[in-house]
Image (tube, rainbow, N blue to C red):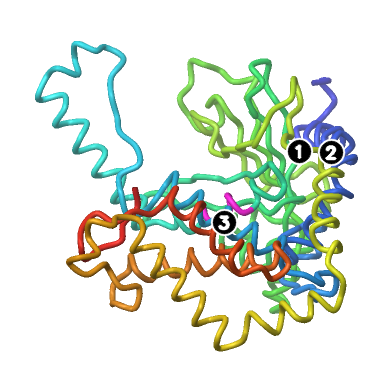
Amino acid sequence: MAEQESRKQFLEKQLSQLVTARTSYDSHWKELSDFILPNCGRFLTTDAGRNKRNTKVVDPTGGLASRTLESGMLSGITSPTRPWFSLSTPDKQLMDSWPVKMWLSQVVELMNDVMNKSNWYQSLTVLYRYLGTFATGAISILEDEEDVIRTHVLPIGSYYISNSDRLQVDTVFRKFSMTCRQLVTKFGKENVSDAVASAWDTGSFETWFEVVHAVLPNTNRDTGKLNAKNKRFSSIYYEPGGSGDKLLSESGFDEMPILVPRWDINGEDDRAGVPADKAVDMAYTQVYQQDDRLKQMISQQVRDKDYIKDRATAAQDNINSLSPSWTSFGAPSISAAGQANQLYQRDYQTIYDANFAQTGGDADQAKAMTNAMIKKVWAVCNCRLVVFR
């Protein structure tokens, strides 16, 4: 960094380079957002707080498929209702020690308590939604005084990323908006720009202002100091429209606080997945291969009482087939009270509806496809409960 260049100028220059590098993805991500996940994209900071009209989705199949994937990933990979991770030590001999096993078990229990009390699982749902549609997602995990951790999923289009030499994301710039009240509360009136301070003085507390949050390797840190500004990763907030080189705050993290999962990595690319233009073509094909008359018929049919009844029957028949040995004692009923039954119904109905639309209204194919998919997640463990595998 040149000596005459301020910290803010350096960050603005790096952000400009990242914006340019992501330009080729923007148009494809916008199309995917418009046709599959309306209101999820945040490509302009002025989009904050605005509900865009859903005018481009003529068939909800793509959105339903995204929801199905989201639900399947949450329940199959990181289910809140069953253990999905464990801890161990690199030294295998230590794992034979009973006190070590007990300590690790207690840590796992504490970690589960933290995740259940925080918004971790709510955020994972959104993260999986983005990951399945755009093949890239980002979630920040920050310390919180009330819940120990607080997570926040970054909307697609609002952030810019770069890889380290190990091809891991180590740089994230996020452009977003905060109100005058939020800025003064978080950073203090003495640290905000003159425009924000003026809005505060005139009582315009809900006026929006653009903010940039940059998290990147701290290449100039003094390893002999333990303060926040000399940690491995710098965390800097600033107002791009603010006067001068003033920063809102500058601190740091020992570890990268923003996780950026990618569906599939190709070489040194920092974004991943099926090429966005191909994904758009696939969505178009899935939506427009059915004529308007067929789409209207399917739309009316899924609201029909007989359709809803047949779908419920199919869901119950699938339970009966999951463990035939239980049927003589009375298989679990999806109409019975209980969270597991409700979650099973939600998963089955969502997947069935998507398959019904995709097959052009073929109930038998929709049932067969749904049963095959649902069996990868659900099973009958006794004559009362339907549980996750």
Q: Front-most of 41 and 348?
A: 348
Q: Earlier in the sequence, mark 3 or mark 1?
A: 1
User: Quick check: is 168 in the magenta stretch?
Assistant: no
- Amino acid type assigned to the residue bearing label 2 in the image: Arg
Question: For this view, does 352 lie left or right of residue 317?
Answer: right
Residue 134 in percent (x, y) is at: 72, 47
Mark 1 to mark 2 CA distance (whole Å) = 16 Å
The residue segment tinted magenta is 124-129
Q: Front-most of 199 and 102?
A: 102
Residue under label 1: 274
Using a 10 Å C-alpha cutoff, classify the residue at mark 2 as few (fewer than 14 neighbours), some (14 to 19) or many (20 or more): some
Outermost residue toward the left?
98
Q: Earlier in the sequence, mark 1 or mark 2?
A: 2
Secondary element type, mark 2: helix
Secondary element type, mark 1: loop
Quarter of the image where one finds residue 110: top left
Residue 119 in percent (x, y) is at: 44, 57
Q: Is residue 220 above or below residue 162?
A: above
Q: Residue at x 74, y 34 (%)?
A: 271
Using a 10 Å C-alpha cutoff, classify the residue at mark 3 as few (fewer than 14 neighbours), some (14 to 19) or many (20 or more): some
Viewer-nearest of discs 1 and 2: 1
Q: Residue at x 61, y 38 (%)?
A: 260
Residue under label 3: 369
| Magenta span dominant secondary structure | helix
Q: Earlier in the sequence, mark 2 or mark 3?
A: 2
Residue 160 in percent (x, y) is at: 75, 40
Q: Front-most of 292 and 37?
A: 292
Residue under label 2: 22
Residue 277 visible in the current orientation: yes
